[in-house]
Amino acid sequence: MKTLKELIGILTRYKVKSIKIIGNPRSENGKPPDRYWTFYEALTSGKLKDDAEAASLFGMGPKDKGYYNLKAGLKKRLLNTVFFINVKLPQFNDVQCAYYSCYKALAQIKILQGRGARNIAIELSKKVLKIATKFEYSQIAWELADLLKNHYATTEGDSKKYQYYQAVSDRYFEILKAEYLAKTYYEQLVLPHVRSKAYRPKTSELAEKFTVELEPMLKKYDASLLHYYGRAIKVLGHMSGGNYQKAINEIREALSFFSAKSFKDKVASALFQQQLVACNFALKRYQAAESGNLQCLEMLSKGSSNWFKCLELMILIQLHAGKYDAAWRTFQKTRKHEQFENLDARVKEFWKILEAWLYYLEATGNISFSASFKCNLQKFRLGKFLNEVPIFSKDKQGLNIPILLIQILFLLLDQNYEAIDYRIKALEKYRSRYLQNNETRRSNYFIKMLAEMNKVSYDQAAVRRNTKKLLKKLQSIPIHFSFHSLELEVLPYEMVWEIISKSYNRKQLIA
């Protein structure tokens, strides 16, 4: 059901004109409308939540073979309709139009060639090769040049044209290999951080090693995809090592490189602009970070994964800047977007973590929910929240830290000291086992401060006295951004401690 909804979301968003390929929407000769069309309209309207509801619409069960065949048939028709996406809409820039047109044409060429329509295949190949060359699509350019090279060798016997396309093919093959290597190295840096947000000190060393190997290729070729990954590796290496100013310098070079191209690659520009935002965020230049993030949002397609990532970062910037109401408004706006439910489970989990911290800020009087929203507000439930973040709950030294802390913060508001005692003891064991390296010292000190509350029976004067030195140590350590997560402290611990000091004696029941 999720894949069907995803396909329909894309097709309706880009106003596919040939949607009739799905089926006949009208009754003909007294016959009822096509089942595929009925199914499609029900899904588009949002009436169907799951397979059980969809199957019952046709008098079947979700496990019936008839429903399985109907669902598979609709998916097949939707996939066929993808070829009719209207790329002439304003939201498609020149680069995107060229990308979809080239890959669509490549499929046509392969089919024509396979069925023996060689002349039209060759004619179309030459035309598409010019577009692929202009927009630096190495994969397509190599495939087409190789096809033309083979044609002039085995069919035409034209030595001059063969040598020309051989040179083109050889060049793009070398570029393609360099792009593949750069992309693979980038993936190796990113892979460990997809399911874990822990800081990994070897990331910086690995990025430097990859950069040394890729540098000759970056100097030899100016292919966009090669520089996209190669320069991203350099930036991530600097950021993971905490060298944010070096990262900013590298980012500016990358932005200059892409702006000099004859075509405007908004995806590449947005990536490096987003990294610039992250660096300004790390250096606590919040106004510059927020302004830059707004520029990113304008470059990206609404509803895309990178668009959501920008909004995630915007909330973190606003929270760290103390603009709590603005962060809540950004969260509400994002959460209501029609593509939110189609996000990857790991991405949605982090939004659940953000939501929990925003609810905490509201519970402590730091955010003002609107009256209309309060009427429909369900009380925050710790148990429900923990069930909604199963991936990061198991992540040691990563996003489970804000998950563990938010539990204690809500229990403090509830004055459930027995439960707090149990959780702080568990957190102390966690601290001694997982938070003993330099990169997790801030979390280490903050957990020690929470433990002091427990030791003096939550007496405010004693807590302030006993945590004074720990607070100074905490303040002396800058926040270290992890490689992929940008920030594990949804709120800086100093700000959380200030909120605790003002609010933990308040009575706030949790459902």
Image (tube, grey):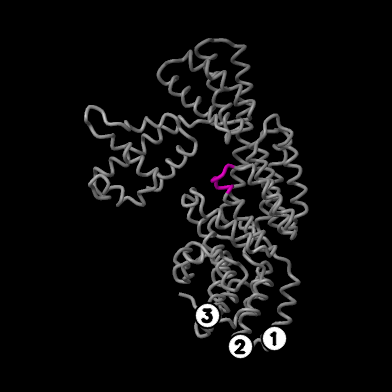
Q: Which residue is more in the foreground, 463 or 501?
A: 501
Q: Which residue is mark 1?
A: 466
User: What amino acid type is highlighted by mark number 1?
Assistant: Asn
| Disc ID at residue 455 | 2
* Residue at 28 percent of width and 47 percent of height: 55
Label 3: which secondary element: helix
Q: Earlier in the sequence, mark 2 or mark 3?
A: 3
In this rendering, position of residue 226 left or right of residue 97: right
Tell me where the magenta segment starts and ends, as one range.
301-307
Q: What whole-number distance in Å separates the C-alpha atoms at marks 2 and 1?
A: 10 Å
Magenta-drawn stretch contains 341: no
State the quadrant of the C terminus: bottom left
Q: At which x and y percent is residue 149?
A: 56, 18
Q: At which x and y percent is residue 400?
A: 55, 67
Q: Which residue is more in the foreground, 333 or 203?
A: 333
The nearer-to-camera label among 2 and 3 is: 3
Task: Rate crowding at label 1 as few (under 14), some (14 to 19) or many (20 or more) other CA atoms within 10 Å.
Answer: some
Asked whether disc 2 touches disc 1, contact meaning CB atoms under 8 Å apart, the reply is yes
In this rendering, position of residue 414 left or right of residue 235: left
Label 2: which secondary element: helix
* Residue at 62 percent of width and 16 percent of height: 163
The nearer-to-camera label among 1 and 3 is: 3
> Can residue 316 be seen by looking at this rendering?
yes
| Disc ID at residue 392 | none
Task: Rate crowding at label 3 as few (under 14), some (14 to 19) or many (20 or more) other CA atoms within 10 Å.
Answer: some
Q: What whole-number distance in Å separates the C-alpha atoms at marks 2 and 3?
A: 19 Å
User: What amino acid type is highlighted by mark number 2?
Assistant: Lys
> Can residue 149 be seen by looking at this rendering?
no
